[in-house]
Image (tube, grey):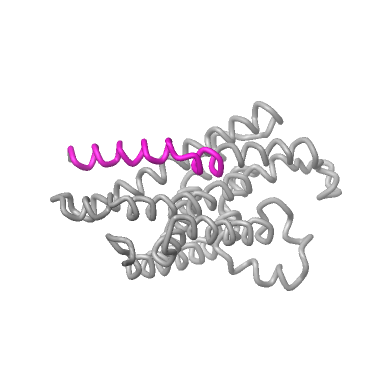
Amino acid sequence: MKRFIAFTRALALIHLRNRAVLFWNLLFPLLMLVIYGLVFNSGAFSDDPTFNYIDWVLPGVLVFNALAFGLITSSTMMLTMRENGVLRRLQATPMPAGQIVGAYLLINVVIVLIQSAVIIAAAVLLFDATVTTTGLLLALPMILVGVMTFVALGQIISGIAPTAGVAVMAGQLGYFALLFVTDMILPIQMLPEWIQRVAVYLPSYAVIQLVRPPLMEGTLASNLSLHLAVAAVYTVVGALIAARLFRWSPRS
């Protein structure tokens, strides 16, 4: 247990000292939230006078923060540890591989939850977003589902990419591709019909449909089982592929 705690603490410090984490998972989501709040208004997206764009987009910001963490931060961090020989040294220790994976997942989850709390607080304080205790409690497990899904996909990138720099580019490509086509910042009804047909099968679409109803309405998604199943498929398949591609040492 002492090894697990020490390794978890070391991982937390590595993440928090990483500039990519600070930018992509804290400054960038907050910046986007401020831009959405200042530039867009509810009337541009709905004729319903009760529609509040900030309440609608807040779940999207939380999801794309988790998406960025999984595809960019988590993948590059694993590659950085591999390039610096950290994983090779861990392989030589008596610490079980299961504890290493558990500590890595724990830190990923905790950091995303802290970032999500900061984003929610900013939305409430700056733009009077409506967030209820019930909504938060229902949304929490859905955010966790998203974190696990995106981290699993990110580890595929870490297994394929030869260097951390390549992983950043690959992660950014996937991140921005999913950001604008899966109902996170723009209602999917505003997108071309062919994109709408494809988007419903993407992981970020499933996660946003799980997170938005709890935060906006205080209820679970009407198609909860379907969206959970889609997220689970991506998580399991991603984890299996990532495990197959995992390496302790850089490619020679």
In the rendered image, residue 67, in percent from the top left (x then y), is placed at: 54, 53
> Residue, x 33% and y 70% (percent of image)?
244
- Magenta stretch contains residue 39: no
In the rendered image, residue 233, in percent from the top left (x then y), is placed at: 45, 68
* Magenta region, residue range: 2-25
Using the image, determine if residue 95 lies above or below residue 134.
below
Q: Nearer the viewer, residue 236 or 221?
A: 236
Q: Which of 108 and 84 is in front in this view?
A: 84
Quadrant the N terminus occupies: top left
- Magenta stretch contains residue 8: yes
Quadrant the C terminus occupies: bottom left
Left or right: 210 with respect to 251?
Answer: right
The image quadrant that residue 132 belongs to is top right
> Residue, x 56% and y 44% (percent of image)?
24
In the rendered image, residue 21, in percent from the top left (x then y), is placed at: 49, 42
In the rendered image, residue 114, in percent from the top left (x then y), is placed at: 47, 36
> Residue, x 76% and y 63% (percent of image)?
191
